[in-house]
């Protein structure tokens, strides 16, 4: 166990940040599943900007890698285009 006050605070903060990251990552994955399951192109096109925004925010905060974010967005655009 930590002996310094700052180390104790860091442990508390790390746990809070871990839970926040986990929540945001799971929310993004659920949005991806929802978007991928859609069959209507119009619906998918309206949902895409919000999902892409979530992906970008996670990449900006280094919760997911920037290349993974680019790959996810690319795959989603291909999926939406194939619905036509």
Image (cartoon, rainbow, N blue to C red):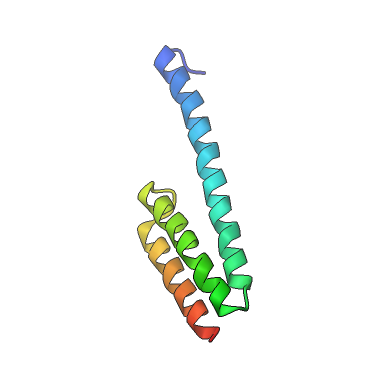
Say if 50 sits above or below 20 in the image: below
Q: How many marks?
A: 0
Vertical placement of residue 4 versus 37, above or below: above
Image coordinates for residue 31, horizontal then vertical, percent: 57, 60
> In this image, 74 relative to 32: left or right?
left
Q: Nearer the viewer, residue 20 or 46?
A: 46
Q: Nearer the viewer, residue 46 or 36?
A: 46
Q: Quadrant of residue 52?
A: bottom left
Residue reaching furthest to the bottom: 84
| Residue 2 locus on image (x, y percent) | 47, 17
The residue under the point 40% across, 17% down is 6
Residue drawn at (51%, 68%) of the image: 46
Q: Identify whether 77 is placed above or below 19.
A: below
Spot occupied by residue 22 in the image (x, y as percentages of width and height): 55, 44
| Residue pictured at 61% horizontal, 65% vertical | 33
Q: Left or right: 39 with respect to 5?
A: right
Query: In this view of the protein, which residue sits in the foreground, 4 or 47?
Result: 47
What is the x, y in percent for residue 13? Answer: 47, 27
Observer-nearest of 2 and 70: 70
Residue 23, quarter of the rendered image = top right
């Amino acid at each position: 166990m930590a002996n310094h006050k700052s180390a104790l605070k860091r442990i508390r903060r790390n746990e809070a940040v871990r839970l926040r990251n986990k929540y945001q990552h799971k929310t993004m994955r659920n949005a991806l599943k929802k978007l991928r399951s859609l069959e209507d192109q119009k619906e998918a096109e309206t949902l895409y900007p919000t999902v892409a925004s979530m992906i970008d925010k996670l990449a900006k905060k280094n919760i997911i890698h920037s290349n993974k974010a680019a790959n996810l967005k690319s795959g989603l655009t291909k999926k939406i285009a194939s619905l036509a």
